[in-house]
Image (cartoon, rainbow, N blue to C red):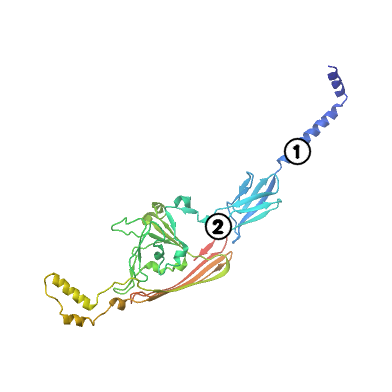
Amino acid sequence: MTKLLLFFGNYKKFPVHSVRKAGLLVLFATISALSAFAQQIEIKGKVLEESTKTTVIGAVIKVKGLKAGATSDANGNFTVKVKVLPVTIAVSAVGFKVQEIEVYEADPTTIYLTEDQNRLSNVVVIGYGTQKRSELTGSISSLPTDKLKQAGASFENALQGAISGIQVTQSSGAPGGGASIRIRGGNSITGGNDPLYVIDGFPVYNNSSETNAGALNSQAINPLSSINPGDIESVDILKDASATAIYGSRGANGVIIITTKKGKTGANKVTYEGSYGIQTATNKIKLLSAKEWGQLKNDARANSGKTAAYTAAQLDSLGSVNNDWQDAALRNAAIQNHNLSFVGGNDKTRYSVSTGYLKQDGILIGTDFQRLSTRVALDSKLSEKFNTNS
Protein backbone atom coordinates (compact mmCIF):
# COMPACT_ATOMS: atom_id res chain seq x y z
CA MET A 1 0.00 0.00 0.00
CA THR A 2 2.89 2.30 0.70
CA LYS A 3 4.35 1.67 -2.77
CA LEU A 4 1.04 2.54 -4.35
CA LEU A 5 0.89 5.85 -2.48
CA LEU A 6 4.42 6.63 -3.54
CA PHE A 7 3.43 5.95 -7.19
CA PHE A 8 0.58 8.38 -7.05
CA GLY A 9 2.77 10.80 -5.30
CA ASN A 10 5.38 10.59 -8.06
CA TYR A 11 2.67 10.89 -10.72
CA LYS A 12 1.56 14.22 -9.34
CA LYS A 13 5.01 15.64 -10.05
CA PHE A 14 4.29 15.61 -13.88
CA PRO A 15 2.48 18.71 -15.19
CA VAL A 16 -0.89 18.17 -16.83
CA HIS A 17 0.15 19.70 -20.16
CA SER A 18 3.14 17.31 -20.44
CA VAL A 19 0.83 14.32 -20.15
CA ARG A 20 -1.40 15.71 -22.89
CA LYS A 21 1.55 16.21 -25.20
CA ALA A 22 2.73 12.66 -24.65
CA GLY A 23 -0.73 11.31 -25.47
CA LEU A 24 -0.92 13.37 -28.64
CA LEU A 25 2.46 12.09 -29.77
CA VAL A 26 1.41 8.49 -29.22
CA LEU A 27 -1.86 9.07 -31.11
CA PHE A 28 -0.10 10.78 -34.02
CA ALA A 29 2.43 7.96 -34.30
CA THR A 30 -0.36 5.39 -34.34
CA ILE A 31 -2.31 7.24 -37.07
CA SER A 32 0.84 7.67 -39.15
CA ALA A 33 1.60 3.97 -38.90
CA LEU A 34 -1.95 3.06 -39.90
CA SER A 35 -1.97 5.47 -42.85
CA ALA A 36 1.39 4.16 -44.03
CA PHE A 37 0.05 0.61 -43.77
CA ALA A 38 -3.13 1.51 -45.70
CA GLN A 39 -1.31 3.42 -48.49
CA GLN A 40 -1.48 1.59 -51.85
CA ILE A 41 0.56 1.88 -55.03
CA GLU A 42 -1.27 2.31 -58.35
CA ILE A 43 0.03 0.47 -61.40
CA LYS A 44 -1.37 2.00 -64.58
CA GLY A 45 -0.98 0.66 -68.07
CA LYS A 46 -2.45 0.03 -71.51
CA VAL A 47 -3.09 -3.24 -73.40
CA LEU A 48 -2.51 -3.29 -77.18
CA GLU A 49 -2.49 -5.92 -79.89
CA GLU A 50 1.07 -6.48 -81.00
CA SER A 51 0.50 -6.71 -84.78
CA THR A 52 -2.05 -3.93 -85.33
CA LYS A 53 -1.28 -1.77 -82.25
CA THR A 54 -5.02 -1.53 -81.59
CA THR A 55 -6.46 -1.50 -78.08
CA VAL A 56 -7.61 -4.73 -76.46
CA ILE A 57 -10.90 -4.28 -74.61
CA GLY A 58 -11.81 -6.50 -71.69
CA ALA A 59 -8.34 -7.91 -71.05
CA VAL A 60 -8.00 -9.41 -67.57
CA ILE A 61 -5.09 -8.17 -65.44
CA LYS A 62 -4.20 -10.22 -62.35
CA VAL A 63 -1.44 -9.82 -59.77
CA LYS A 64 0.19 -13.19 -59.15
CA GLY A 65 -0.05 -14.26 -55.53
CA LEU A 66 -2.61 -11.57 -54.66
CA LYS A 67 -6.31 -11.05 -55.16
CA ALA A 68 -5.79 -7.70 -56.87
CA GLY A 69 -6.96 -7.44 -60.47
CA ALA A 70 -8.65 -5.28 -63.09
CA THR A 71 -9.92 -5.27 -66.70
CA SER A 72 -8.98 -2.95 -69.54
CA ASP A 73 -11.55 -0.33 -70.56
CA ALA A 74 -12.68 0.80 -74.01
CA ASN A 75 -9.33 2.55 -74.53
CA GLY A 76 -7.31 -0.43 -73.30
CA ASN A 77 -6.34 1.33 -70.05
CA PHE A 78 -6.27 -0.34 -66.63
CA THR A 79 -5.31 0.46 -63.04
CA VAL A 80 -4.22 -2.08 -60.41
CA LYS A 81 -3.57 -1.21 -56.75
CA VAL A 82 -0.90 -3.08 -54.78
CA LYS A 83 0.79 -2.54 -51.40
CA VAL A 84 4.40 -3.30 -52.29
CA LEU A 85 6.65 -3.56 -55.32
CA PRO A 86 7.91 -5.46 -57.23
CA VAL A 87 5.00 -7.66 -58.36
CA THR A 88 4.27 -9.93 -61.32
CA ILE A 89 1.10 -9.27 -63.31
CA ALA A 90 -0.50 -11.64 -65.83
CA VAL A 91 -2.55 -10.21 -68.72
CA SER A 92 -4.93 -12.46 -70.64
CA ALA A 93 -7.67 -12.02 -73.23
CA VAL A 94 -9.72 -14.30 -75.48
CA GLY A 95 -7.73 -15.21 -78.57
CA PHE A 96 -4.39 -13.96 -77.19
CA LYS A 97 -1.47 -15.58 -75.42
CA VAL A 98 -1.06 -14.86 -71.71
CA GLN A 99 1.59 -12.19 -71.10
CA GLU A 100 3.44 -11.97 -67.77
CA ILE A 101 5.59 -8.98 -66.80
CA GLU A 102 7.37 -7.90 -63.64
CA VAL A 103 6.69 -4.39 -62.38
CA TYR A 104 9.40 -2.73 -60.29
CA GLU A 105 8.21 0.90 -60.47
CA ALA A 106 4.81 2.55 -60.55
CA ASP A 107 5.39 4.04 -64.01
CA PRO A 108 2.79 3.69 -66.80
CA THR A 109 3.48 0.59 -68.87
CA THR A 110 2.27 -0.73 -72.23
CA ILE A 111 1.56 -4.44 -72.66
CA TYR A 112 1.42 -6.05 -76.10
CA LEU A 113 -0.56 -9.26 -76.64
CA THR A 114 0.01 -11.68 -79.49
CA GLU A 115 -2.72 -13.74 -81.15
CA ASP A 116 -3.08 -17.38 -80.17
CA GLN A 117 -4.84 -19.28 -82.94
CA ASN A 118 -5.25 -22.38 -80.79
CA ARG A 119 -7.08 -20.53 -78.04
CA LEU A 120 -9.15 -18.61 -80.56
CA SER A 121 -10.43 -21.83 -82.11
CA ASN A 122 -11.64 -23.02 -78.71
CA VAL A 123 -14.43 -20.41 -78.67
CA VAL A 124 -17.43 -20.69 -81.00
CA VAL A 125 -19.92 -17.87 -81.53
CA ILE A 126 -23.37 -19.30 -82.12
CA GLY A 127 -26.67 -17.68 -82.97
CA TYR A 128 -27.85 -17.44 -79.40
CA GLY A 129 -24.60 -16.78 -77.47
CA THR A 130 -21.07 -18.04 -77.03
CA GLN A 131 -20.02 -21.54 -76.04
CA LYS A 132 -16.75 -23.39 -75.66
CA ARG A 133 -15.80 -25.58 -78.58
CA SER A 134 -15.35 -28.52 -76.19
CA GLU A 135 -19.07 -28.39 -75.47
CA LEU A 136 -19.91 -28.68 -79.17
CA THR A 137 -17.40 -31.31 -80.22
CA GLY A 138 -20.06 -33.65 -81.51
CA SER A 139 -21.80 -31.02 -83.61
CA ILE A 140 -18.93 -29.02 -85.13
CA SER A 141 -16.10 -30.46 -87.20
CA SER A 142 -13.29 -28.78 -89.11
CA LEU A 143 -11.52 -29.99 -92.20
CA PRO A 144 -7.73 -30.25 -91.71
CA THR A 145 -5.97 -27.63 -93.80
CA ASP A 146 -3.58 -30.16 -95.34
CA LYS A 147 -6.57 -31.95 -96.89
CA LEU A 148 -7.38 -28.87 -98.98
CA LYS A 149 -4.07 -29.24 -100.82
CA GLN A 150 -5.26 -32.65 -102.00
CA ALA A 151 -8.73 -31.51 -103.01
CA GLY A 152 -8.16 -31.45 -106.77
CA ALA A 153 -10.93 -29.82 -108.78
CA SER A 154 -13.34 -29.29 -105.87
CA PHE A 155 -12.95 -29.04 -102.10
CA GLU A 156 -15.77 -31.59 -101.67
CA ASN A 157 -13.34 -34.35 -102.61
CA ALA A 158 -11.29 -33.50 -99.51
CA LEU A 159 -14.26 -34.30 -97.26
CA GLN A 160 -14.22 -37.98 -98.17
CA GLY A 161 -13.02 -39.94 -95.16
CA ALA A 162 -11.76 -36.80 -93.40
CA ILE A 163 -14.71 -36.07 -91.08
CA SER A 164 -16.83 -38.62 -89.26
CA GLY A 165 -20.59 -38.54 -89.67
CA ILE A 166 -20.52 -37.14 -93.22
CA GLN A 167 -21.36 -39.26 -96.26
CA VAL A 168 -19.66 -38.12 -99.46
CA THR A 169 -20.63 -40.01 -102.62
CA GLN A 170 -18.97 -39.19 -105.90
CA SER A 171 -21.83 -38.99 -108.37
CA SER A 172 -19.54 -38.71 -111.37
CA GLY A 173 -16.00 -39.84 -112.04
CA ALA A 174 -15.44 -37.10 -114.60
CA PRO A 175 -13.09 -34.22 -113.68
CA GLY A 176 -15.12 -31.42 -112.09
CA GLY A 177 -18.00 -33.76 -111.40
CA GLY A 178 -20.21 -33.23 -108.39
CA ALA A 179 -20.46 -35.13 -105.13
CA SER A 180 -23.51 -35.94 -103.06
CA ILE A 181 -22.99 -34.85 -99.43
CA ARG A 182 -25.28 -36.02 -96.63
CA ILE A 183 -24.69 -34.68 -93.14
CA ARG A 184 -27.93 -35.64 -91.44
CA GLY A 185 -29.11 -38.32 -93.84
CA GLY A 186 -31.96 -38.06 -96.34
CA ASN A 187 -34.73 -36.17 -94.56
CA SER A 188 -36.87 -35.14 -97.52
CA ILE A 189 -38.50 -37.10 -100.34
CA THR A 190 -39.51 -34.24 -102.63
CA GLY A 191 -37.12 -31.53 -101.38
CA GLY A 192 -33.35 -31.36 -101.48
CA ASN A 193 -31.11 -33.06 -98.94
CA ASP A 194 -27.95 -31.13 -99.71
CA PRO A 195 -26.41 -29.04 -96.92
CA LEU A 196 -26.37 -25.27 -96.88
CA TYR A 197 -23.09 -23.71 -97.96
CA VAL A 198 -22.05 -20.41 -96.34
CA ILE A 199 -19.17 -18.74 -98.18
CA ASP A 200 -17.70 -15.77 -96.27
CA GLY A 201 -21.04 -15.22 -94.55
CA PHE A 202 -23.20 -15.50 -97.68
CA PRO A 203 -25.58 -18.50 -97.74
CA VAL A 204 -25.50 -20.53 -100.95
CA TYR A 205 -27.87 -23.48 -101.34
CA ASN A 206 -26.56 -26.00 -103.86
CA ASN A 207 -29.86 -27.51 -104.96
CA SER A 208 -28.22 -29.68 -107.59
CA SER A 209 -24.80 -31.21 -107.26
CA GLU A 210 -24.24 -30.91 -110.99
CA THR A 211 -25.29 -28.58 -113.80
CA ASN A 212 -24.99 -28.96 -117.54
CA ALA A 213 -22.01 -27.30 -119.18
CA GLY A 214 -24.28 -25.53 -121.67
CA ALA A 215 -24.51 -27.80 -124.70
CA LEU A 216 -27.05 -30.54 -125.19
CA ASN A 217 -25.99 -33.82 -123.54
CA SER A 218 -22.69 -32.24 -122.51
CA GLN A 219 -20.65 -33.10 -119.47
CA ALA A 220 -22.23 -32.19 -116.12
CA ILE A 221 -20.14 -29.81 -113.97
CA ASN A 222 -20.27 -29.23 -110.24
CA PRO A 223 -20.97 -25.52 -109.54
CA LEU A 224 -18.79 -25.63 -106.41
CA SER A 225 -15.81 -26.66 -108.52
CA SER A 226 -15.54 -23.01 -109.55
CA ILE A 227 -14.08 -22.29 -106.08
CA ASN A 228 -10.33 -22.70 -105.99
CA PRO A 229 -9.40 -24.84 -102.94
CA GLY A 230 -6.20 -22.81 -102.72
CA ASP A 231 -8.27 -19.74 -101.78
CA ILE A 232 -9.99 -21.48 -98.85
CA GLU A 233 -8.71 -20.75 -95.34
CA SER A 234 -10.95 -23.16 -93.42
CA VAL A 235 -13.99 -25.42 -93.78
CA ASP A 236 -16.26 -26.00 -90.76
CA ILE A 237 -19.30 -28.27 -90.69
CA LEU A 238 -22.31 -27.77 -88.39
CA LYS A 239 -23.94 -31.15 -88.00
CA ASP A 240 -26.65 -30.81 -85.34
CA ALA A 241 -30.04 -29.15 -85.26
CA SER A 242 -28.69 -26.04 -83.50
CA ALA A 243 -27.65 -24.80 -86.97
CA THR A 244 -31.30 -23.92 -87.55
CA ALA A 245 -31.00 -21.33 -84.76
CA ILE A 246 -28.61 -19.42 -87.02
CA TYR A 247 -29.75 -20.17 -90.57
CA GLY A 248 -33.34 -21.27 -90.09
CA SER A 249 -34.88 -24.21 -91.94
CA ARG A 250 -32.19 -23.99 -94.63
CA GLY A 251 -29.72 -25.39 -92.11
CA ALA A 252 -31.84 -28.47 -91.37
CA ASN A 253 -29.59 -30.62 -93.59
CA GLY A 254 -26.42 -29.29 -91.98
CA VAL A 255 -24.23 -26.31 -92.81
CA ILE A 256 -20.80 -26.17 -94.45
CA ILE A 257 -19.06 -22.89 -93.60
CA ILE A 258 -16.29 -21.87 -96.01
CA THR A 259 -13.92 -19.04 -95.08
CA THR A 260 -11.60 -17.71 -97.77
CA LYS A 261 -8.15 -16.27 -97.22
CA LYS A 262 -7.79 -12.59 -96.30
CA GLY A 263 -4.92 -10.14 -96.22
CA LYS A 264 -2.65 -10.02 -93.18
CA THR A 265 -0.69 -7.26 -91.53
CA GLY A 266 3.02 -7.56 -92.01
CA ALA A 267 5.64 -7.81 -94.69
CA ASN A 268 4.54 -8.58 -98.24
CA LYS A 269 4.54 -12.34 -98.85
CA VAL A 270 4.59 -14.15 -102.17
CA THR A 271 3.60 -17.83 -102.19
CA TYR A 272 3.58 -20.35 -105.02
CA GLU A 273 2.26 -23.89 -104.86
CA GLY A 274 2.26 -26.28 -107.76
CA SER A 275 1.74 -29.94 -108.44
CA TYR A 276 1.80 -32.29 -111.40
CA GLY A 277 0.65 -35.88 -111.62
CA ILE A 278 -0.48 -38.69 -113.87
CA GLN A 279 -3.87 -40.44 -113.57
CA THR A 280 -4.39 -43.97 -114.73
CA ALA A 281 -7.07 -46.64 -114.50
CA THR A 282 -6.03 -49.04 -111.77
CA ASN A 283 -8.52 -51.85 -112.40
CA LYS A 284 -9.65 -52.75 -115.88
CA ILE A 285 -12.20 -55.45 -116.66
CA LYS A 286 -10.69 -58.57 -118.13
CA LEU A 287 -12.40 -59.24 -121.47
CA LEU A 288 -12.68 -62.24 -123.78
CA SER A 289 -11.17 -62.31 -127.21
CA ALA A 290 -13.49 -62.60 -130.19
CA LYS A 291 -12.73 -66.32 -130.63
CA GLU A 292 -13.26 -66.98 -126.89
CA TRP A 293 -16.58 -65.11 -127.03
CA GLY A 294 -17.72 -67.23 -130.01
CA GLN A 295 -16.73 -70.44 -128.26
CA LEU A 296 -18.59 -69.34 -125.11
CA LYS A 297 -21.72 -68.74 -127.19
CA ASN A 298 -21.44 -72.18 -128.78
CA ASP A 299 -21.12 -73.77 -125.32
CA ALA A 300 -24.20 -71.91 -124.08
CA ARG A 301 -26.26 -73.13 -127.09
CA ALA A 302 -24.99 -76.66 -126.61
CA ASN A 303 -26.10 -76.64 -122.99
CA SER A 304 -29.56 -75.63 -124.17
CA GLY A 305 -29.70 -78.44 -126.77
CA LYS A 306 -29.25 -76.10 -129.69
CA THR A 307 -26.86 -76.19 -132.63
CA ALA A 308 -23.64 -74.20 -132.51
CA ALA A 309 -23.75 -70.59 -133.64
CA TYR A 310 -20.27 -70.65 -135.23
CA THR A 311 -18.43 -73.32 -137.13
CA ALA A 312 -14.79 -74.10 -136.46
CA ALA A 313 -13.78 -72.07 -139.52
CA GLN A 314 -15.79 -69.09 -138.34
CA LEU A 315 -14.18 -69.30 -134.89
CA ASP A 316 -10.76 -69.29 -136.48
CA SER A 317 -11.66 -66.21 -138.48
CA LEU A 318 -12.80 -64.44 -135.31
CA GLY A 319 -9.37 -64.97 -133.81
CA SER A 320 -7.95 -62.20 -136.00
CA VAL A 321 -10.50 -59.63 -134.72
CA ASN A 322 -9.59 -58.48 -131.19
CA ASN A 323 -10.42 -54.91 -130.13
CA ASP A 324 -9.96 -53.87 -126.51
CA TRP A 325 -12.33 -50.92 -126.33
CA GLN A 326 -11.09 -50.07 -122.84
CA ASP A 327 -7.65 -49.30 -124.23
CA ALA A 328 -9.29 -47.29 -126.99
CA ALA A 329 -11.37 -45.16 -124.62
CA LEU A 330 -9.07 -44.84 -121.61
CA ARG A 331 -5.69 -43.16 -121.34
CA ASN A 332 -3.04 -42.01 -118.89
CA ALA A 333 -4.20 -38.47 -118.09
CA ALA A 334 -2.15 -35.60 -116.70
CA ILE A 335 -3.30 -33.25 -113.93
CA GLN A 336 -1.53 -30.02 -113.01
CA ASN A 337 -2.39 -27.35 -110.46
CA HIS A 338 -0.72 -23.96 -109.92
CA ASN A 339 -1.51 -21.30 -107.30
CA LEU A 340 0.22 -17.92 -106.90
CA SER A 341 -0.72 -15.51 -104.09
CA PHE A 342 0.38 -12.08 -102.84
CA VAL A 343 -0.48 -11.24 -99.21
CA GLY A 344 0.45 -8.24 -97.09
CA GLY A 345 -0.69 -4.96 -95.59
CA ASN A 346 -0.27 -2.49 -92.79
CA ASP A 347 -2.35 -1.18 -89.90
CA LYS A 348 -4.91 0.41 -92.21
CA THR A 349 -4.97 -1.68 -95.38
CA ARG A 350 -4.62 -5.42 -95.92
CA TYR A 351 -4.74 -7.20 -99.26
CA SER A 352 -4.74 -10.68 -100.72
CA VAL A 353 -4.41 -11.31 -104.45
CA SER A 354 -4.36 -14.87 -105.77
CA THR A 355 -4.63 -16.62 -109.09
CA GLY A 356 -4.90 -20.31 -109.82
CA TYR A 357 -4.88 -22.62 -112.80
CA LEU A 358 -6.05 -26.23 -112.85
CA LYS A 359 -5.99 -28.53 -115.85
CA GLN A 360 -7.22 -32.07 -115.35
CA ASP A 361 -7.35 -34.43 -118.32
CA GLY A 362 -9.93 -37.14 -117.82
CA ILE A 363 -8.93 -40.79 -117.99
CA LEU A 364 -11.89 -41.18 -120.35
CA ILE A 365 -11.15 -39.30 -123.56
CA GLY A 366 -13.30 -36.17 -123.93
CA THR A 367 -13.79 -35.46 -120.21
CA ASP A 368 -11.21 -32.72 -119.62
CA PHE A 369 -11.64 -29.95 -117.04
CA GLN A 370 -9.90 -26.57 -116.81
CA ARG A 371 -10.26 -23.74 -114.31
CA LEU A 372 -8.60 -20.33 -114.26
CA SER A 373 -9.47 -18.26 -111.21
CA THR A 374 -8.42 -14.86 -109.89
CA ARG A 375 -9.42 -13.42 -106.55
CA VAL A 376 -8.76 -10.05 -104.90
CA ALA A 377 -9.56 -9.37 -101.20
CA LEU A 378 -9.00 -5.85 -99.85
CA ASP A 379 -9.70 -4.69 -96.29
CA SER A 380 -9.22 -0.99 -95.62
CA LYS A 381 -9.72 0.97 -92.42
CA LEU A 382 -10.75 4.44 -93.55
CA SER A 383 -11.45 5.75 -90.03
CA GLU A 384 -12.07 4.53 -86.51
CA LYS A 385 -15.72 3.80 -87.34
CA PHE A 386 -15.65 3.04 -91.06
CA ASN A 387 -14.13 -0.05 -92.72
CA THR A 388 -14.41 -1.37 -96.26
CA ASN A 389 -14.16 -5.03 -97.23
CA SER A 390 -14.14 -6.43 -100.74
Nearer the camera: disc 1 or disc 2:
2
Residue that label 1 marks:
33
From what the image shows, is residue 316 above or below residue 163?
Answer: below
How many neighbours does mark 2 have within 10 angstroms: few (below 14), some (14-19), or many (20 or more)? Answer: some
* Residue 147 image-quadrant placement: bottom left
Q: Residue furthest front?
A: 312
Q: Is residue 112 left or right of residue 324?
A: right
From what the image shows, is residue 368 above or below residue 134?
Answer: below
How many neighbours does mark 1 have within 10 angstroms: few (below 14), some (14-19), or many (20 or more)? Answer: few
Q: Is residue 233 visible?
A: no
- Identify the residue shown where x is 35% and y is 77%: 331
Q: CA distance from mark 1 to mark 2?
A: 47 Å
From what the image shows, is residue 290 above or below residue 68?
Answer: below
- Identify the residue shown where x is 83% and y is 28%: 19
| Residue 116, label in figure | 2
Residue 145 picture location, percent across and down: 47, 63
Q: Is residue 44 visible?
A: yes
> What amino acid does circle 2 point to?
Asp
